[in-house]
Structure formats: structure tokens, C-alpha cells
Image (spheres, rainbow, N blue to C red):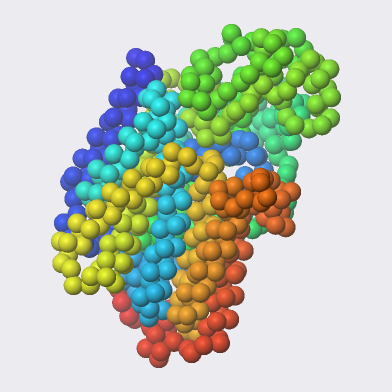
Amino acid sequence: MSLQLMTYLVVGATFALYIFIAIKSRAATTGEFYVAGKGVPPVLNGMATGADWMSAASFISMAGLIAFKGYDASVYLMGWTGGYCLLAMLLAPYLRKYGKFTVPEFIGDRYYSHTARVVAVICLITASLTYVIGQMKGIGVAFSRFLEVDFSVGLVAGMVIVFIYAVLGGMKGVTYTQIAQYCVLIFAYTVPAVFISLQLTGNPLPQIGLGSTMADGSNMYLLDKLDKILVDLGFAAYTVQKGTTINMFLLTLSLMIGTAGLPHVIIRFFTVPTVKDARSSVGWALVFIAILYTTAPAVGAMARLNLMNTIQIGPVGSPDGNIRIEDVPSWFTNWEKTGLLKHEDKNNDGRIQYYGPSKEFAVKAASFGWKGNEMIKVDRDIMVLANPEIANLPNWVIALVAAGGIAAALSTAAGLLLAISSSISHDLLKGIFAPNISDKTELMASRIAMAGSILVAGYLGLNPPGFAAQVVALAFGLAASSIFPALMMGIFSKRANNTGAILGMLAGLGSTLVYIFWYKGWFFIKGTEMLANTPDNWLFGISPEAFGAVGALINFVVALTVSNMTAPPPEHIQHLVEDIRVPGTGRQ
């Protein structure tokens, strides 16, 4: 059976499953649409949270970043998993105890202000829409290769599927669909990793294979061989730090507190019956997430090794050291058709030269007759999807990976879109502008808002500002700088008032947006040229993805300073703060 037909069957079967679950779990009330009736068991909620969390950035892009950045990409592993510890200890149980539907609703009540609620909605939509852009990029990448359609066609197909099961089922349908999607994505991620680890090291566990010797008889450890190949070709060693320590620290911190401030993740802990179940859900989510996150470093390293061995087939500089263009394997030509992989024969020798930018190697490359790196584009987001093809795995495994990548993107996109639609219908419409509307009208407004959100997200996803994981990191920075500080002060500071919270959120979000827009080159212009997004131009070497931690600090400083200069919150709000933190009392 051809790969395309196999992929259509596997992906089609998963789509049918998702839609069937959505129809069977159709939300009939606002409680079911927003929080699944608060009846999801902790283990199942942990699995759904894992799928909600492990987006296209985790499944498709994170291992791609690890493949090309090596040691420096460990910040994504540390930041994204460490954030769950913060979520478990500092936010999830307290917010569940308060017992409302959305994050802006809590902020509006805690800071006794409709304005605070509106600002929280703005922060939520800004972060969530940025996050959805990354998911749409992942959907388009997966569809464009394996279903052999244009990137934009694949993106639209993903939008339609999300529309059907998210709009129909709401949180109830999304929860049970995400459980199925978790099973698909984790199976799709680990099975190829096991195959490839066996091929390269003889060890079936990728986590152990990463630190094992090669099965080619060289007695070299896998990482040592990868280091040698890269250094020999003018790239930096895979296992050494290349970025600045301050940027790595701030990026890790930004990802951690961004995780704890993501509304679509927080809302998952409103769906369980009790506060104890909220804590338990976080623990189960960590278990389910750890399966993929401990496998990702091996997937990234093995993918990079397979890619280098595909192109560099002999000693560096030898006449047969680079693969002939007519001999490139089928996976290479297939991915070229998508536009995500490109080469150019600059010296017309009929071979592909792929080497790094080091000045020392440039002199050596010139002596070989090489006239520049001929691999002019290798989109990092293709590495996980292309790896099974590079390793010549069976078609059913390749099709399974396609289904897993699409499942990862769809599951997170659905959660984000649900958070956006609920903030519009519940927080703005029901909470402020039309408080007397019926549940039926509110439910219809939620579905209309979600449909509109899908259209906006799809449009923005056609031109993403970077790799999926980079875009998602920007979203985490926005959540870190705006929502996380407001929630933390709302739970742990009786002195934080509405004026401080509002100005703090605006300061944190505004400063982070300005920094991102400036260095990502979307909006601001310096002179006649865009300011280059390079470490040399960054403020104190802080990347746009890492600035969320600085934005969070600005938020805290502004909010606490203004709060201490203005009137304290009313007495009943201070009692509310105490009540939320005391075990066994208050709302359940």
C-alpha cells in the first residue's frame, strides 16, 4: 500500500474518531461547554491536559529545535515541564477552589473591577492567538507533506476538523477528544523512536539509546559521533552551550511562568470535581507528558545524525564525500516538493555540500572547491515527521507519525480556541455587556465566537513569524508577562488592588509586545531597515522568546508599587484572598 493511501486511511480514521466523540459528548449546557460539568476524573483529566499541553511545538518542533540547537534547546524541556510544578503548587488548587469558569472571571472578581476583567480578556486573547499560530503551522507542515497538498490547503482542513468537534462538544467534547488524541500522539511519537534507537544503537529505549554506543561497530557513543560529524563540517559541537547564560536562564524562567499562566491549561483544572482532584490531575499530567519529553532529546539527536549521514556519505573534502544530486533518497525529494527543504548546486559539481558557518572551515571549504552551503533551507519543523522516512521505516509507521503530529496540533488548538471563545462569550458578553442573557443564548454566542476565532487563527497561521516552537515560546512570554503575575498577586497578596493589577498587566503585556515586535521585525522600523533579530542587537542579549520573564518583573513592580500608593482592596476582598488559601473552606 502506498504511503499516501496509508496516510489517508490512518489520518481519516483518527478524524472520524474525534468527530464521533464530539457528537457523543455534545455540550447541552454552559457548564458542560466551559468546564465539562466539573465531572472529569483526575487520571482522564491528566491525559487530556497532556494532549492540551503537548502541541505541535512539543510533537513536531521541539525535537527539531533540539536537532539543530543541541544543548541550548534543553531550555524548552526544563521550562515547559518545570512550569507544571509551579502550576501544581501555586495556582491550580486555589483557582479550582474558587470555582469559576474562566481566568478573566477570577481576575475580575478578585480585583473587583470590570476593567480588570476586560484587560485580562485582552491578555488571554493575545497570548492564545499567538499560540494558535504555532499550531496552525504544525497542521500545515504535516498535511503538506503526507497528504501531498499545499500548506494552505492542509491548514484549512485542520481548521474544519477543529471547528466540528470543538464547536459541537465544547469543553466536554474537547476533553474526551483530547484523551483519544493523547493516545494517538504518544503512540505515534514513541514507536518510531524505538525503531530508530534500535537501528542506531541496538537499544529499544530511546532514552538509554541516546547515551549508548553506536551499533555500527565504531564503539563511539552516539553523541560523540554526532559532535565529531558536526565539528568536522564547521558546525558547533552538539553538546556544548552556544547561547549566553543569561538568555538561557530568562528563557527557561519565561517558559516556566508562562506555562503556569496559560489560560487554556489552567481551565483544565476547573473540570475536575474537587480541589484534591485538581492537584492529582497535575501529577497525572506530568506523568503523561514525561513520556514524550524524555523521548524528545533522543529523537532530536538521532534525527540530526540521520540527516547528516544522508548528505555527508564519506570523508569531508573527498570526491565522494557528498551525495550526488541524482542519488538523493525519495524522502529528500518528497520534502523538497513542500518548499520546506531546498538545495542549490552553487559550484555545479552535481553534489550537495552541507557545512557550517565557522570561519576556519570556510577556508577549508574553499580549498575543496565548495562555494557556499548548498542546503539553503532545512525547516526545523520537518525533522520529526521526516525522521521515519530518513530511517526507511515501514509506511504504517510514517503514516502514524503524520496522524500524531496532526493530533498534537488539533488538541492544543481546540483548547486554546475554547479559552478564547469562553472569554468573549462568558467574560465580555455575559459578564459585562449583557448579563441577563439566557444560557442558550450564551452557548450560541460561545460557538459563534469560536468559529470567528478559528478563522482569525487560520489567517494568521498562513504567515507565522517563525518555527512552531518559537511562536509558541512567544505566546508563553506574553502569558508570563501579563496573566501569571495577576494570578499570583490575586492569590497571595491581600494588598494588591484593582488599579495596580490593571496597570501591571498593561505594563507587562505592552513592554513584551514592543520588544517582540521590534526584534521579530513585524512592525517597528529603525531608519529604513528592520532591526535584525540577532543576539548582537538584543537588549543585554535577551531574545524575544525570553523577554516574558522581564515583562513579568515589570508587571510585578508596577502592580505592587501602584497598589501600595493607592487605597487597599475592600475588606471582603481581603477575606476572599484568605479564604482561597485556607484548606477545607470556601468554594468547592
Residue in front for this viewpoint, 107 or 406: 107
x%, y% of residue 218? 71, 22
Left-right relation of 390 to 188: right
Left-right relation of 471 to 8: right
Residue in front for this viewpoint, 431 or 284: 431
Name the image quarter holding the C terminus.
Answer: bottom left
Q: Residue at x 66, y 51 (%)?
A: 526
Q: Residue at x 18, y 50 (%)?
A: 26
Is residue 279 shown to the viewer in this render?
Answer: no
Q: Residue furthest front?
A: 528
x%, y% of residue 308? 65, 24
Residue in front for this viewpoint, 51 or 538: 538
Left-right relation of 113 to 443: right
Q: Residue at x 30, y 43 (%)?
A: 162
Indicate the quadrant where residue 281 lies.
bottom left
Left-right relation of 115 to 39: right
Name the image quarter holding the N terminus.
Answer: top left
